Image (cartoon, grey):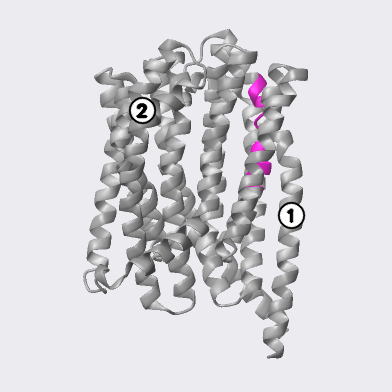
Amino acid sequence: MTRVILRAGFHSQIHTMFWRYVIPTTAGMLASGLYQIIDGIFIGHFVGESGLAAINVIWPVISVVVGAGIMIGIGTGSLMSLYRGRSNASLTEASLKAGIIFLISVSVGLTLLLFLTCAYWVKIQNISPIIFKQAMEYGDVLTWAAGITLSATALPFWIRNDQKPHLATAIVTIGAIGNVIFDYLLIGVAGWGLTGAALATSGAQLIIVIICLLYFIKRTSQSTELSTLTVRHLLRYFAQISVLGGAPMILFIYSGLMVALHNYQFTRYGFDPDITAYAIISYLLALYYLIAQGIAEGIQPPMSEYHGRQQSSFVYALLKLGICWSTGIGVVWVIVSNAFPNLIFYGFDAESSTVQLATLNGIHYHLWGVILDAIIILFILYFVATDQGRTAVVLSIINISAQIPCLFLMPIELGLKGVWLAMPLSKLPVLLLTLLTFMQAVRKQKGSDSVQQVS
């Protein structure tokens, strides 16, 4: 009887912790990611199909900036959670301060990099002149606002890992509401097109940055000064942050890389309507990814804390819940998208029969692969949360590498259908390898736990 009560208490604690972090994190991810989806809806209605294609073309550049923000956000946040789990307040504070300096440094570097290379990365996607012009309208604003985008991505992660998940969600939601208002004013009323979309997003992100900075200024007013961190300590923290946040960054930048490679292949085996259709499919993928990533990043802080306390059973229980919910939601999303494509066409004002037919092909052949990718991401973030950053990075690189040969070889035999099928089919062997790596890590952890119990 006592055993049953203890087990019930265990499950109750796990579910409480799961929903405490997952609900606000997922809501925050949806609010944050809706920037691009809202931009797409406004652009589809007020600019047209070439505008949708252009925003898809500039996305690989956006993904580099946001990916760097995710690296610093999750890397710093994971360190904070690990040290908090070990009840080491001084190292928790030192991790936060190192993260701030890292954020400023990367912001300056990325601004310079985009200034020199943004146009090049857009041009190599082999697009038409009108789409290039519209993409660069967005890219020019992004270049000068890179530090804002980077900070707006990273700072809410720190607040969430500072045991304030609801506050982080509220801040991101305020930014999303601001983005809707700015989109309406700058795209719908002023008619500024892609420039207006970029300014709307940057303005909303600036609101997020200001609120987050006010929180951290208040929080650190009585803490140790930044000068106590030597250059040697900073470099060590930078390396730890990069390793822990490297896998999520690679996963995000990988999504941008795949968009660029798909755009290139669609121009080889299809036409501009296929790029527009892929942009619409990308929004559908993004909407589910935001939910799946919200689940994955929501369970990361408690998994890190439980790992710090050496409570492996809690870590595995949280991971199991995350996989079940992520998979279930993905299956429902794919079914709904296949059942009601007309709602998708209406949402993005896709009236062209050519674009509609291409979008249907994407829904049938491409969309289901997102479920496999979401499961892989959950396992990768498990390795991040349990201080196995190098394993996470290696799996992330494999996840990227597996898709590239499929994307270039399958269309040779299957044509346009091969472009659509490359992503989902490439995920099958990667998922198998990820499961085998996880099982090996579990066996190693059980052996370590047994040694500690004997000691």
Q: Give 242 or 77, whichever is nearer the viewer.
A: 242
| Most foreground residue, 125 or 88 | 125
Which quadrant, please, contains the C terminus?
Answer: bottom right
When the figure is inspected, residue 62 is found, relative to residue 172, above or below; the finding is above
Q: Which residues are magenta?
A: 361-375
Tell me the crowding category of disc 1: few under 14, some 14 to 19, or many 20 or more residues within 10 angstroms, Cα based: some
Residue 444 lies left or right of residue 118; in this view the side is: right
Residue at the bottom extreme of this rendering: 455
Image coordinates for residue 280, horizontal then vertical, percent: 53, 24
- Give residue 286's position: percent from left, percent from top: 53, 36
Identify the main secondary structure in magenta: helix
Q: Residue at x 26, y 68 (%)?
A: 226
Any part of residue 343 in sight: no
Residue drawn at the location 75% of the way across and 51% of the way down: 433
Mark 2: secondary structure: helix
Q: Is residue 111 left or right of residue 271?
A: left
The circle on residue 284 is none
Q: Which residue bears the numbered disc 2?
A: 139
Q: Does the rendering let one see residue 397?
A: yes
Q: Depth check: 276 or 149 in front?
A: 149
User: At 25% from the left edge and 69% from the top edge, which residue is drawn?
Assistant: 227
Let me know if residue 149 is in the magenta part.
no
Question: Which amino acid does the dot numbered 1 rest on?
Answer: Leu
Element carrying mark 1:
helix
- Check disc 2 and give the amino acid type: Gly
Residue annotated with mark 1: 435
- Foreground label between 2 and 1: 2
Residue 40 image offset from top left, x and y in percent: 43, 26
